[in-house]
Image (spheres, rainbow, N blue to C red):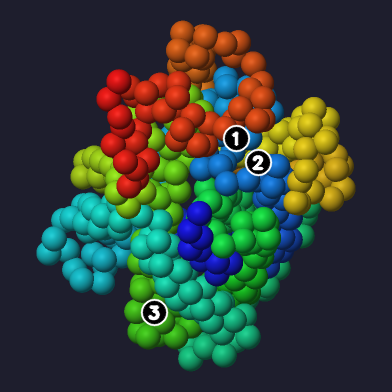
C-alpha cells in the first residue's frame, strides 16, 4: 500500500461532509425556537453521534481497510438483507437528494452574488461536472481539494461564530433575551433538528486503505470532526442571539447571510457567501467521492452488480461516480432540487441515516458475542450500556422527526414505502443471485478476503474487474 492521507486529510473529509449549507437552516430553526437553550440539544446529539462514530470505529478496527465500510460490517453482523436495505437507503438514496440540494443552494448563492443573468441550474450543474472530474482523478486529488476547503471553512465559521458570541462585530447588537424556553419537553424534541448538524463522520471509513495510520487516525478523525463542528455550531447560536432578532432568524431563507450581514455589514455578507459556496462544494465533493467508494465496496461483497467496482487508471470507481453525477445533474437541471418538496424528501431520507447508526450499534453488540477472540485495536468503552443509550436516543429522534403529527406520518409513510421497495430488491437479489439465506451471516474471514481483487479473478474470471496497472490476463 502507498498511504497518502494523514489525520488532517481525514478530519477534512469528516468536517467537509458534516458542514453543509443545509445545516444553517436547522441551526437557525432550533435557535429561534428556544434561544441558546438549543445548545444542550446540540451537545446531546453530538454525544449520541460520537457514540455512533465509536461503534463504527470499533467495526473498522475489527475489519480494517475495507472500502465498503458499514456494508461489510453489517454483512458479517446481520446478513445481506439488512445490509442492502440500510446501506442503499441510508447512503445511496438519501445522498441522491442531498447532493442536488447542496447544488441548488450553491446556485442560489451564486445568483444572489452575481445576479440572475444565467439560469440557477447552470451554476449547480457546472459545480457537479467539475466535482465529477476531480473525483475521477482519484482520492489523492479529491482529498487535497477537501483539505483546503475544510481548512478555510472551519477557520471562517469559527471566526464568525466567535466574533458573534463575543459581541465584537461592527454591527449593532440586538437587545433580546438569550433564553426563549427552558421546558425540557420543548428542548428534547429539537435533538431531531440538531441531528442533521452531525451527519457524515463515518465517510472517513472508506479512506482507511489510503491513510498513513488508519488504526490510530480513523477514531481520532471521526471524534475531532464532530467536536469541531459542535464548538462552531454552539458559537453560532450565541452569535445569532447577539446580532439577529429571533423572529427574523426564523423567517429567513438564508439565516447565515442575515447573521453575517447584521454583524459585519457588507464584508460579512461577502465572507459568508464565500463560506456557503465552499460548504456546498465540500459536501457535494464528499458525497460523490465517499458514496462511490461505499458502493464499490458493496459490489466487492456481491450486494451490488460487479460493474460498480470497476476503476479507472487513477483507482477511482468511475461507474459509480458517473452514475451519482448524472443523477445529480438530472435533478438539478429539472429544478427538482429546490423548494419544500426536496427538503421534505431529504428529511424522510434522513431516517435511513438514523437507522444505519442503530444498525452499527447492533453490529458491535452481535460481534462482541460472536467473535470475542478477534483482535481489535479500538474498543468502545462502556459496552453495552453506551450502545443501548445511543440506540434509545436515536429512536427518540426518529419518533420526533417532525413536530407536526401529520407531517410525521407522511414521512413515516414515504420511508416505509422506500424500505419496502428496497426489501423486495434485497430479497430477490440475495435469493436469486447469491443463493443464500437473507439472514445468512457471512464469515468475517470471507468478507475480508473479498476485498482482494484476486478473490474475483479466481471465482469470476470473466466479470471481475482488472486491478489498476495490472498485467493483462493470460488467455486459457
Residue in view at x 21 percent, y 56 percent? 126
Name the spot of residue 62 as percent of width and height, x first.
70, 42
Q: Would residue 119 be found to the left or right of residue 299 on screen?
A: left
- Per the image, the residue denoted by label 3 is 271
- Is residue 231 among what the camera can see? yes
Residue occupying the point 64% across, 16% down: 439
N-terminal label among 1 and 3: 3
Name above or below for residue 287 compared with residue 96.
below
Mark 3 against mark 2, which lies toward the viewer?
A: 2
Tell me the CA gap for discs 1 and 3: 47 Å
Distance Cα–Cα, label 3 vs label 2: 43 Å
| Image quarter of the C terminus | top left
Circle 2 is placed at which residue position?
63
| Residue 470 figure quarter | top left
Compared with 377, 38 (above or below) is: below
Does the residue at mark 2 contact the one at mark 1 (Cβ under 8 Å)?
Answer: yes
Q: Report which residue position mark 1 lands on.
A: 448
In the picture, measured across the screen, residue 282 lies left or right of residue 117, that is right
Q: Quadrant of residue 384?
A: top right
Amino acid at each position: 500500500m502507498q498511504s497518502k492521507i494523514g489525520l488532517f486529510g481525514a478530519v477534512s473529509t469528516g468536517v467537509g461532509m458534516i458542514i453543509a449549507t443545509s445545516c444553517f437552516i436547522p441551526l437557525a430553526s432550533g435557535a429561534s425556537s428556544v434561544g441558546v437553550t438549543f445548545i444542550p440539544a446540540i451537545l446531546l446529539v453530538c454525544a449520541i453521534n460520537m457514540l455512533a462514530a465509536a461503534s463504527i470505529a470499533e467495526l473498522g478496527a475489527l475489519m480494517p481497510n475495507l472500502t465498503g465500510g458499514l456494508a461489510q460490517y453489517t454483512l458479517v453482523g446481520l446478513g445481506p438483507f439488512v445490509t442492502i436495505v440500510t446501506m442503499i437507503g441510508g447512503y445511496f438514496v438519501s445522498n441522491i437528494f442531498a447532493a442536488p440540494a447542496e447544488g441548488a443552494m450553491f446556485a442560489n448563492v451564486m445568483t444572489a452574488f452575481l445576479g440572475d443573468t444565467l439560469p440557477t441550474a447552470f451554476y449547480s450543474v457546472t459545480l457537479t461536472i467539475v466535482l465529477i472530474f476531480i473525483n475521477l482523478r482519484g482520492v489523492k486529488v479529491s482529498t487535497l481539494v477537501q483539505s483546503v476547503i475544510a481548512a478555510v471553512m472551519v477557520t471562517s465559521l469559527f471566526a464568525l461564530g466567535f466574533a458573534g458570541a463575543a459581541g465584537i462585530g461592527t454591527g449593532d447588537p440586538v437587545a433580546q433575551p438569550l433564553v426563549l424556553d427552558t421546558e425540557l419537553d420543548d428542548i428534547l424534541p429539537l435533538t431531531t433538528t440538531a441531528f442533521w448538524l452531525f451527519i457524515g463522520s463515518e465517510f472517513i471509513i472508506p479512506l482507511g486503505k489510503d491513510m498513513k495510520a488508519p488504526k490510530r487516525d480513523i477514531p481520532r478523525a471521526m471524534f475531532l470532526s464532530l467536536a469541531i463542528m459542535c464548538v462552531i455550531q454552539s458559537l453560532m447560536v450565541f452569535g445569532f442571539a447577539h446580532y439577529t432578532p429571533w423572529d427574523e432568524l426564523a423567517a429567513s431563507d438564508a439565516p447565515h447571510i442575515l447573521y453575517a450581514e447584521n454583524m459585519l455589514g457588507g464584508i460579512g455578507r461577502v465572507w459568508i457567501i464565500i463560506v456557503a459556496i465552499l460548504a456546498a462544494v465540500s459536501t457535494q465533493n464528499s458525497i460523490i467521492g465517499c458514496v462511490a467508494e461505499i458502493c464499490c465496496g458493496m459490489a466487492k461483497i456481491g450486494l451490488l452488480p460487479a460493474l460498480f467496482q470497476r476503476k479507472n487508471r487513477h483507482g477511482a470507481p468511475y461507474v459509480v461516480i458517473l452514475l451519482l453525477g448524472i443523477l445529480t445533474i438530472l435533478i438539478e437541471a429539472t429544478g427538482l432540487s429546490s423548494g419544500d418538496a426536496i427538503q421534505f424528501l431529504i428529511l424522510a431520507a434522513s431516517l435511513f441515516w438514523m437507522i444505519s447508526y442503530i444498525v452499527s450499534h447492533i453490529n458491535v453488540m452481535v460481534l462482541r458475542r460472536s467473535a470475542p477472540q478477534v483482535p481489535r485495536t479500538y474498543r468502545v468503552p462502556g459496552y453495552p450500556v453506551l450502545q443501548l443509550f445511543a440506540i434509545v436516543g436515536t429512536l427518540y429522534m426518529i419518533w420526533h422527526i417532525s413536530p407536526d403529527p401529520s407531517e410525521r406520518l407522511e414521512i413515516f409513510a414515504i420511508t416505509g414505502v422506500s424500505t419496502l421497495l428496497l426489501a423486495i430488491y434485497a430479497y430477490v437479489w440475495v435469493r436469486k443471485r447469491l443463493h443464500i439465506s437473507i439472514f445468512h451471516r457471512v464469515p468475517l474471514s470471507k468478507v475480508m478476503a473479498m476485498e482482494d481483487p484476486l478473490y474475483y479473478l479466481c471465482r469470476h474470471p470473466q466479470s471481475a474487474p482488472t486491478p489498476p496497472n495490472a498485467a493483462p490476463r493470460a488467455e486459457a
